[in-house]
Image (cartoon, helix red, strand yellow):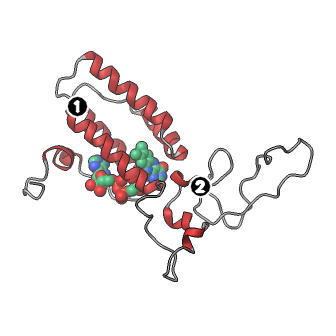
Amino acid sequence: MAADSTEPQPTSVPAADGAVAGTTVEPPKKFPKGVVLGKDGKPCRSCTSFAAWASQTKSSLNTTATTTPTQPQKDCPPDVETLGRSTWTLLHSIAATYPPAPTPKEQSDLKSFMRLFSRLYPCWVCAEDFQAYMQKQEVRAGSRDEFGNWLCEAHNEVNRKLGKSTFDCAKWEERWRTGWKDGRCE
Ligand SMILES: Cc1cc2nc3c(=O)[nH]c(=O)nc-3n(C[C@H](O)[C@H](O)[C@H](O)COP(=O)(O)OP(=O)(O)OC[C@H]3O[C@@H](n4cnc5c(N)ncnc54)[C@H](O)[C@@H]3O)c2cc1C
């Protein structure tokens, strides 16, 4: 549900607090292109890139520069990219510390976590696509290697959707567990 500057968004606006059915309804608002709306019809910050977000808020006015800022402030609510980077860091770190030979309980805990994660992820458009992916590609939790590769492939699916290059999954442990062989992480 991305807003389009040429079309009024959203198509159905929730009534303002206290409004009675049948009385005057606010006209649909227009939002800049790229702003994703939440299910409540309001702009969803954690679903939207900061650049698009800043173009519709006063943050673009709160800068001494004449151009719109391109990076979110560190201590503000996350945009879709900041949230995504932090989340992938958490997920791949969970894979990195997952046991090589997990017990049945550890395997079911991981599967439950991923199922709930995919329902609770704050970017709802991301969450819905991720749930659909998990329906097609069931979480593999039989070992660290299995889960690390499953997650890498899942991340690559999102990379492809966003037009980014894919990551070589043979290297997921170097990236997230051991550090690169050239020693730069030591
Ligand atoms: C479950 C989920 C779904 C998402 N869906 C969307 C969406 O629908 N729309 C949207 O705009 N954004 C979505 N995002 C956010 C998006 O994936 C990125 O996090 C965001 O665009 C920032 O990208 P980035 O280029 O900084 O690197 P990120 O993709 O955040 O990756 C962080 C780091 O992980 C490493 N990496 C990259 N690919 C892999 C891989 N396959 N395996 C292991 N490591 C890897 C790289 O070192 C990279 O720098 C989603 C995030 C998550 C967690």
Q: Nearer the viewer, residue 92 or 18?
A: 18
- Would residue 160 be visible to someone looking at this image? no
Task: Please determine whether, in this image, residue 133 is positioned above or below residue 164.
Answer: above
Q: Which mark is residue 36?
A: 2
Task: Please determine whether, in this image, residue 179 is positioned above or below residue 106.
Answer: below
| Within-10-Å neighbours for mark 2: few <14, some 14–19, many 20+ | many
Q: Residue at position x 26%, y 41% from top?
A: 93
Q: Which mark is residue 158?
A: none
Q: What type is the residue that disc 2 sits on?
A: Val
Q: Is residue 26 left or right of residue 66?
A: right
For the residues bearing labels 2 and 1, Cβ distance under 8 angstroms? no
Q: Residue at position x 53%, y 57% from top?
A: 48
Q: Nearer the viewer, residue 64 or 1?
A: 64
| Percent position of residue 34, x then y | 57, 62
| Within-10-Å neighbours for mark 1: few <14, some 14–19, many 20+ | some
Q: Earlier in the sequence, mark 2 or mark 1?
A: 2
Q: Is mark 1 within 8 Å of ligand 1?
A: no
| Percent position of residue 181, x then y | 8, 53
Q: Nearer the viewer, residue 11 or 134?
A: 11
Dot 1: element: loop
Q: Which mark is residue 98?
A: 1
Q: Quadrant of the C terminus?
A: bottom left
| Percent position of residue 44, x then y | 58, 52
Q: What type is the residue that disc 1 sits on?
A: Tyr
| Percent position of residue 32, x then y | 63, 66
Q: Residue at position x 21%, y 22% from top?
A: 102
Dot 2: element: loop
